[in-house]
Image: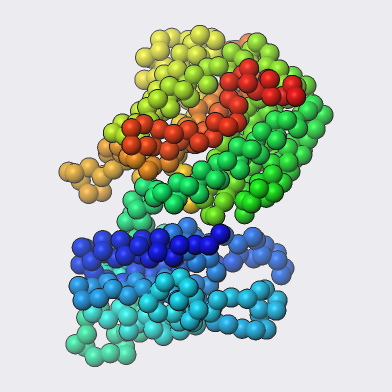
Amino acid sequence: MMKDINIYANRRTKLMNKINDLGGGIVIIYNSPKYQRNADIYYPYRHDSDFYYLTGFSEPNACLVLIVSDQYQRSILFCRSKDFIKDMWEGPVYGPNIAAKLFGFDEGYSIQELNKMIPNMVLNKKSIYAKLYSINNKNILQQIQFWIHTAKKENSSEITLPTSLCDISYLLSDMRLIKDHNEISIIRKSANIAASSHIHAMLNTKPGMHEYEIEAEITYQFRRQGASSIAYDSIIASGKNACTIHYSTGNSILCNGDLILVDAGCEFNSYASDITRTFPVNGKFNNVQLAFYEIVLSAQKAAIEKIIPGKKYNEAHEAAVKILAQGMLDEKLLTGSLDGIIESREYLKYYPHSTSHWLGLDVHDCGNYKKLSSKNENNFSTWRELKEGMVLTIEPGLYINPNQNIPKHFWNIGIRIEDTVIVTKTGYELITRDVPVEPYQIEDLMKR
């Protein structure tokens, strides 16, 4: 798919305008490096999400530099130089000149020139903005110290150097939190691919199979439909394994009468999808499974109805918790009063996670769930309000591990139902409901 480079250029301009309002400075953002797996083998490469958001450029060994002042704004890409011998082994790269032209930068240079050029670029700048806590560049503070030391050594005492070092992540998180129309369309496509793949998994699940066979079916469907990769390690958890929230897909056999939890999403054009369904291995819920499934489904429906612009982020979670806690009381998982269970958080025994997370370039996308208190610049005390263009998941669950205080036929039931929701101008849009979610729909599908 051809990229519209104006999308990325406009994002850079928007960021530079924000930096200018703060007094100007220089922005330095690295792309992810390649990581060695073993011997001469590397892990599959994935670019840094912030870097890609601003550039659309996905080659490793690259760096984005933005220079911002009242007088001018410049966008500069440092990347790998052309090397025809390396091209034979690893494939061609753009090279600085072509990359700068194709991706809409003012200038392009070899990454080898970065340490030589940055010391002059920081001269007379008030601030340096960088990702200070990135796992992809743990040495950024030492690099910045080196650049400033070099600039001081190579220039006269009359020059001024940056006096402020700022984490760019907060500005970028707020930008990325609201998706534009282009991002929404890509996320919809990612969700469509994932939904179709989940349906294939349901249709192909049978007692006697292994968990990894379902994982293989889903991964195959992702790639067959054009997804570049999985968005995260798929969770294919049957029987008691579904009570482990981040279970790593293994070789357990799918047993007749058990439930299977499938949490899987793909990455399409760098944007993630995220869906979870729980369904019976043999295609038919038993009475106990159905009772708990309907509790979780009711909790999800109640949470989804709270996805309205102006509502606080936590309202969906609170709605889900109320339904789940009442269900725990009704089924005698817990005793006491509803208010008491919620206040004491005793429900955490069976529902220990949040109901939502942001979704975008990362499956757990950036963006604070609380906003800064007006009274304290370091205190995130107020839940963020939902706004049009936000994308999040709704994923309540119940996980019932063996416990002598509850009936044995409740043991080892793990259920999670997860869908992706776009906040619209007046409410919400569910984009993953192509996958059946009502119990009768699931059973009807699996009869085929």
Q: Residue 168 or 353: which is nearer the viewer?
A: 168
> In the image, is residue 119 above or below residue 193?
below
Give me the residue at 55% from left, 41% from top: 191
Q: Residue at x 64, y 60 (%)?
A: 44
Q: Is residue 345 visible?
A: no
Left or right, 169 with reference to 436:
left
| Display coloring | rainbow
Q: How many numbered badges does the structure rendering display? A: 0
Q: Which residue is drawn at 45% across and 62% down?
A: 4
Where residue 304 appears, x then y in whole percent?
Answer: 43, 27
In the rendered view, would you say 325 is above or below 355?
above
- Residue 25, position in %: x, y? 27, 71
Camera-nearest residue between 430 and 130: 430
Q: Which residue is drawn at 35% across and 62% down?
A: 10
**Could you tell me residue 182's position as x and y percent?**
44, 52
Dividing the image into 4 quarters, which one contains the N terminus? Answer: bottom right
Viewer can see residue 341: yes
Q: Is residue 263 above or below residue 70?
A: above
Image height check: is 181 above or below 330?
below
Left-right relation of 268 to 88: left
Quadrant assignment for the C terminus: top right
Which quadrant holds residue 259?
Answer: top right
In the image, farthest residue toward the left: 375
Residue 252 x/y as whole percent: 76, 34
